[in-house]
Amino acid sequence: LKRITPVTWFNWNTKQNSARIMLREIISQKADCIIFVGNAIEGEVFVKALSTMENSANIPLISHWGITGGDFTSRVSKELRKDLQIYFIQSCFSFLTSEPTPVSKSVAERAINLFPEQLRTIADIPAPAGFIHAYDLGKIFIKAVSQIELTGNVSIDRAAIRAALENLQSPVDGLVKNYRQPFETWSSKNVDAHEALGGEDICMAQYDEQNRIILEL
């Protein structure tokens, strides 16, 4: 029988020495890869620790998209990254590589116009996964709220918005996709009812030498 490598837990503010001990144990168990679930700060610590270990290039590190939400690329240089196999999960939309749509063109233009000091081009968005998800979820939320009459009573309005989110009356055209029925009423028999994205909407990605996120389509 194939042996399953156990889960290793780490706390926030883990230091590089602790990370090395964890990684050494994982590698000693002959894991095929390391699946990392964390954010940019911890991602920096573990990637730098991995880079100091023998044969580190032989074991891929596959990360949660949390590492793309901070200044990971400014702290983990492209020179260090090129000697490692670092991948992360990303929704299958990119302003850089996806086929432009009327929605994506409009969003890119508005973002650059609204934040001219931060965004010279749409490639300058510092956390594209967060931006994309926030935009799509924001549109879905606005659509749900437009279906109801707000009363000013928090409990009543919260329940009404939840019901509207689970019963959208018309599609929402987002960046990732067109959402026809993103949410349904949750039950123990429908545990993915509140998951707007499916496996077909998720891709692997990497940083290139210009620190851009490139989808592995």
Image: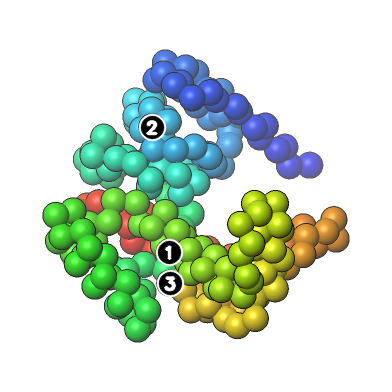
Say which residue appears at 53% left-offset and 23% top-offset.
11
Q: Which residue is mark 3?
A: 175
* Above or below: residue 92 compared with residue 26: below
Question: Alpha carbon of mark 3 to alpha carbon of mark 2: how far?
Answer: 27 Å
The quarter of the picture where the N terminus appears is top right
Q: Which residue is mark 1?
A: 135
| Image coords of residue 179 (percent x, y) | 57, 76
Q: Are marks 3 and 1 in contact (CB under 8 Å)?
A: yes
Element on which disc 3 rests: loop
Q: Nearer the viewer, residue 151 or 170?
A: 151
Quadrant of res 130: bottom left
Q: Nearer the viewer, residue 17 or 97?
A: 97
Question: Alpha carbon of mark 3 to alpha carbon of mark 1: how far?
Answer: 8 Å
User: Which is nearer the N-term, disc 2 or disc 1?
Assistant: 2
At label 1, the amino acid type is Tyr
Q: Which residue is mark 2?
A: 41
Quadrant of res 195: bottom right
Q: Is residue 47 visible?
A: no
> Looking at the image, is mark 3 or mark 1 nearer the viewer?
1
Q: Is residue 83 left or right of residue 119?
A: right
